[in-house]
Image (spheres, grey):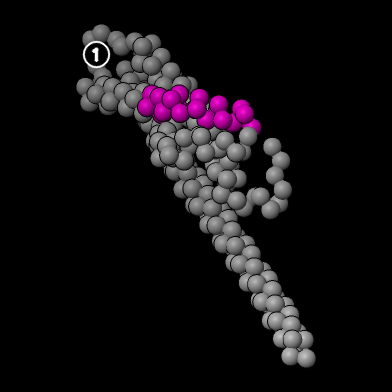
Amino acid sequence: MSQSGGDLHTSQYLSWRKLHLSRAKLKASSKTSALLSGFAMVAMVELQLQTPVTIPSSVLVVFAVITTLLVAVHMLALMISTCILPNIEAICSLDAISLVHESPHERLHWYIETAWAFSTLLGLLLFLAEIAILCWVKFYDVNKTAAWSASVVLVPILFIFLAFAIHFYRSLVAHKYEMTVSGIRELERLKEQIEQGDMEHNRVNGVNDMLSSGVHIV
């Protein structure tokens, strides 16, 4: 689909861009959620505990809670993506900007953002916590040093992850702000051009009226 430079600032084209952005977010959410939730389920099913169990019950409770939350969060994101994505794909496949109003991406914007946040931010944080607690469950009876080592390694990774997430979202907000300011300036420039055109038109009409009146007096 090709667009001329004058059409890039129309509301229809902006909605078309949001449509493709929503499509990309839902695709990434569905793939990430399916992968990580499958890993969590396999880790829980394949985990073999020695009998009698010497692992503290609090560690097992935390492992069960984190695993359940991880699967539930990613399943929710996967359900939202699976329900909304076909409707968006149907409009994108037609490659007709005039049909963008038939897509539900504007009306379901908050659901799309929820799926994106659950799959990327909250889901990945739970996944890191899952790795840490899984190391405790797996290595507690074998070597506690290994469990502590895994926790120590994951702490700086968690801080790096949070720092990147904060930096990314701040950069994204700054980019949206700059684009909005640029769009407002473009609208103001168009407004000034229209006003100047109206003034020129009125001036020409005034001169013509004066000439017409002069001719009529003569």
Tell me which residue sits at (43%, 39%) in the image.
107
Q: Which residues are magenta?
A: 74-95
Residue 35: percent from left, percent from top: 48, 21
Residue 12 can be seen in this image: yes
Quadrant housing the C terminus: bottom right
Residue at the disc numbered 1: 53
Q: Is residue 78 magenta?
A: yes
| Disc 1 element | loop
- In the image, 157 versus 165, the foreground residue is 165
Decide whether the magenta segment is chiefly helix, strand or loop: helix
Residue 13: percent from left, percent from top: 60, 45
Quadrant housing the N terminus: top right
Residue 33 can be seen in this image: no
Is 68 rendered above or below residue 125? above
Is 187 rendered above or below residue 169? below
- In the image, 200 versus 215, the foreground residue is 215
Residue 71: percent from left, percent from top: 36, 23
71 left or right of 51 in image: right
